[in-house]
Amino acid sequence: MEVNIHEAKTHLSKLLERVALGEEVIIAKAGTPVARLIRIEMEPKTRVFGSAKGEFTVPDDFNDPDPEIEDLFYEGPLFPKTDVSTK
């Protein structure tokens, strides 16, 4: 797609959306191409397994139940404690 400078200034965000989808946009001045908008291909960051080793430790009680959170689930407004004697 080719657009003139005025159109590019007026519709830059729409043009950038099209570029993000893979379309190439040529910007021309008086009919002569002067710039090309293309999508930047980003390389995925490489991840190194275990790169944070030694930066933190998992506490021994990590999987232990948390009474405060359990109260929110079982005795909170969604599941209020029911009185068995009234049934």
Image: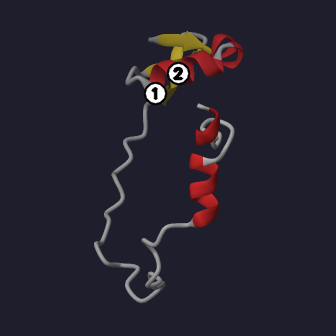
* Image quarter of residue 5: top right
Of 32 and 35, nearer the camera is: 35
Which mark identifies residue 69? none
x%, y% of residue 32? 52, 16
Viewer-closest of 66 and 55: 66
In-image side of 6 versus 1 (left or right) = right
Chosen colour scheme: secondary structure
Kind of residue indicated by mark 2? Glu
Give how far across and how far down residue 72 sits, in percent.
63, 50
Instruction: Report the residue marked by disc 2.
Output: 17
Is residue 71 found left or right of 52 in the rendered image? right
Residue depicted at 54% across the width and 10% down the height? 31
Give the SS element for disc 2. helix
Residue 20 - label? 1
Residue 70 image point, x, y percent: 56, 56
Q: Residues within 10 Å of mark 1 (few under 14, many from 20)?
A: some
* Residue type of the residue flagged with mark 1: Ala
The residue nearer to you, when weighing 48 against 85, is 85
Residue in the image at 60% along x and 38% along y: 79
Name the residue located 37 percent from the left edge and 84 percent from the top edge: 53
Residue 2 to residue 45: above or below:
above
The residues bearing labels 2 and 1 have C-alpha atoms spaced at a distance of: 5 Å
- Few, some or many residues within 10 Å of mark 2 (<14, 14–19, 20+): few
Residue 11 at what x, y percent from top left? 65, 14
Circle 1: element type? helix
Image position of 57 with respect to 26: above or below: below
Horizontal arrangement in the rendering, residue 6 relative to residue 46 (left or right)? right
* Location of residue 39 by image quarter: top left
Q: Quadrant of the N terminus?
A: top left
Picture mark count: 2
Q: Dots 2 and 1: beta carbons under 8 Å?
A: yes
Quadrant where the C terminus sits is: top right
